[in-house]
Amino acid sequence: MGNKGKSEYIRKLYEQQSTLDQSIARQMMNSERLAFATSQWRMMWRKFVKNRIAVLGGIVVLLFYLIALFADFIAPYTLQQRMDQYSFLPPQKIHFFYEGKLQPFVYSLEGTRDPETLMKVYIPDHEKQIPVRFFVQGESYKLMGLFPASIHLFGTEEGIVSVMGTDGQGRDMFSRIIIGSQISLTIGLAGVALSLLIGAFLGVYSGYFGGWIDNLIQRMIEIIRSFPPIPLWMALTAALPSHWSPLKVYFAITVILSLIGWTWLARQLRGKVLALREEDFVLAARLSGASNWWIITKHLIPATMSHIIVISTLSMPSMILAESSLSFLGLGLRPPLTSWGVLLQQAQNIQVLLLYPWLMMPGFFVAISILAFNFLGDGLRDAADPYTV
Amino acid sequence: MIAYIVKRILGMIPTLIIISIITFIIIQLPPGDFVTSVQAEIASSGGGMDATAVEAMRVRYGLDQPILVQYWKWVRGFPKGDFGYSLEWNAPVWDIIKGRLMWTFLLSGLALIFMWIVSVPIGIYSARNKYSLGDNIFTFFGFVGLSIPDFMLSLLWMVFATIVLGFSASGLYSPHMVDAPWGFTKFLDLLNHLWPPIVIMGIVGTAELIRIMRGNLLDVLNQQYITTARSKGLEEKIVIQKYAVRMAINPLISVLGMQIPKMISSSIIVGLVLSFPTIGPIFLRSLITQDMYLAGAILLLMTIMLLVGNLLADIALAWIDPRIRYE
């Protein structure tokens, strides 16, 4: 091979290489453009949807809130409706098929007393079926506290249908649990919303400005967090005057719950903002003359939005748990307000539990709602960082 | 190291002063005082108290004095271990609570140990078999354990013990054992009542610890010194135990500080449901009767317990991880 041949060969090699480089570069650009085309929220959504158990948790949470919204309609009875002849009725079995046809029914019940224990026992009359019908006329109520109505999703025209039994006053547990969910699930939301308001403001402020304000806020958080939560909540709720109206107590409990809740949120957001503060887009905004308020509300808060959502979801379980624990101890909400914790007050005594175990049912609703929120929050946390696999 | 510990302890003093003030304010929050709650109790049983008796009672307990004086009378005894006087029990606060504090301490400590014993091996297994069936099952049950309220678990255990095992799960001893002479059977009975609250309290935190342990170990296993250790032919067992776990365990110690308040809270609720002689039942009672020095001392002592726990966790971390610098 002569000198010319050699240089020709090199040039050829070079051309091959450069076309290869170009095609790689083109591919990279394409994929980059693709990455740009997908917004961050969409990436998070994609990652979230892949996590089946988190999606399931989300669906359950959604379902719970839907049920709470239409609770008075779904519940066959109202909150305080007493059926004295059916006190401490064990959960009834609903039979779905009548002579091969789909026709839900329950057996009529005959209440007598056990001659030995004097306990009330109910003997189903297998000759007499009471059909369970949909959209029956029942006690009147106000849907969402606004629209008067008297149609219930299901119910019977005579006798009783009680899938989770009744309490000592003959009130249907299922109806009370469903309607009680309104308070149990909203007090968590309200508590988180309030914590968010305080925590997001103070956390972002603290992280953005630094200095002595930051120092003061951090000391405050340290002091609050040095109290163990349940004892502190117990002491504060015990201080609520007994003559306060239910609504006032509800709001007071919300405030007490968020008193500790905000500190966690503020800590997390402060850390996030401390990092974001040094980013170029904040500098750019400042150089273009944006005010601090503008930077915080238009840049920093949206940038931390995904974290705010994750933290709020993850703080829901502790709020629900705290409310039900306090109410269970008799310190939180009190009747006539009805939450799951209040319903569980009657299940404190072991003798009562052994005789009427269905009074524990509200506890399972507490557990399921907390589980659903935990799964949802965990999935959201993973999804909030869509760049790591 | 000693300088660090001394500095930390000195740093706690201002915090303690502020906390004692806040505690006193919280305890003073309810309208009325101990005398009003006594009056209400007497009135509810049909009796009555005349005004001079009420006043005399207030004077005797020093409830007629200004708040600041009351506060000062309360805190000045602390350095001597005097936590005030319980109005309801007519005894020094310390005498009433010291035994209960011991049980709270014992239960919380044992629950923490239980959590570690359970979660560290599971965390290691889960990290080494990522996304395996076992990993998923442990994660799932961890979440379930995390989600069942501790009072609910206590109730379920009581029902289960009574119906299935046929023994009374509440209290320290079975009813027929309470007056029995101290012996091996009584000791066994005590153990039988002791482990359920520990397990119930431990279950709540286990899921979190498993998760942290698993995550840390996964991070550590990706690091180069692990690859080096493997490539030079070290046994996998040694790589995991001596190299990886040793590093991955540090963050577990730093979350100890977050676990302690949960354990204290949990010991109160579990103690209340299982009528265990923890601080819980007496705290609830003191809050309801407005026995303010007792309630205040309990809240304060639990806060101190938390602060000391945090301090110990920090010291342990500094001791175990030489990279941590104490300034």
Image (cartoon, rainbow, N blue to C red):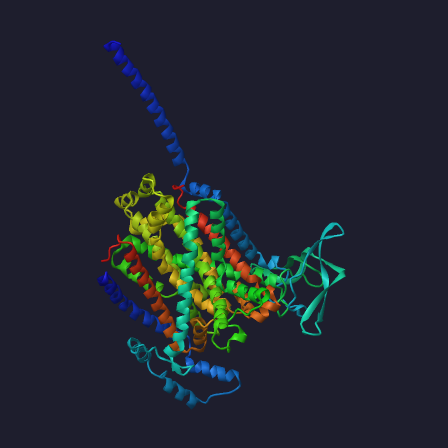
Q: Can you tell which quarter of the image residue A3 is in?
A: top left
Q: How many marks?
A: 0
Point out residue A237 in the picture as x, y percentages from the top left corner: 44, 69
Return the residue nearer the eye: B251 or A210. Answer: B251
Q: Up-down: is A19 above or below A260?
A: above
Return the residue nearer the eye: B112 or A367. Answer: B112
- Residue at 22% x, 62% y: name it: B3
Q: Up-down: is B326 above or below A30?
A: below
Look at the image and tell me in which quarter the C terminus of chain B lies.
Answer: bottom left
Point out residue A91 in the picture as x, y percentages from the top left corner: 64, 62
Q: Can you tell which quarter of the image residue A14 is in?
A: top left
Point out residue A209 in the picture as x, y percentages from the top left corner: 27, 54
Q: Is residue A248 visible?
A: no
Point out residue B118 in the picture as x, y percentages from the top left corner: 44, 56
Q: List the single residue furthest toward the right.
A: A127
Left or right: residue A62 versus residue B104 is: right
Q: List the single residue furthest toward the front.
A: B184
Look at the image and tell me in which quarter the N terminus of chain B lies.
Answer: bottom left
Left or right: residue B175 versus residue A134 is: left
Q: Is residue A122 visible?
A: yes
Left or right: residue A251 versus residue B222 is: right
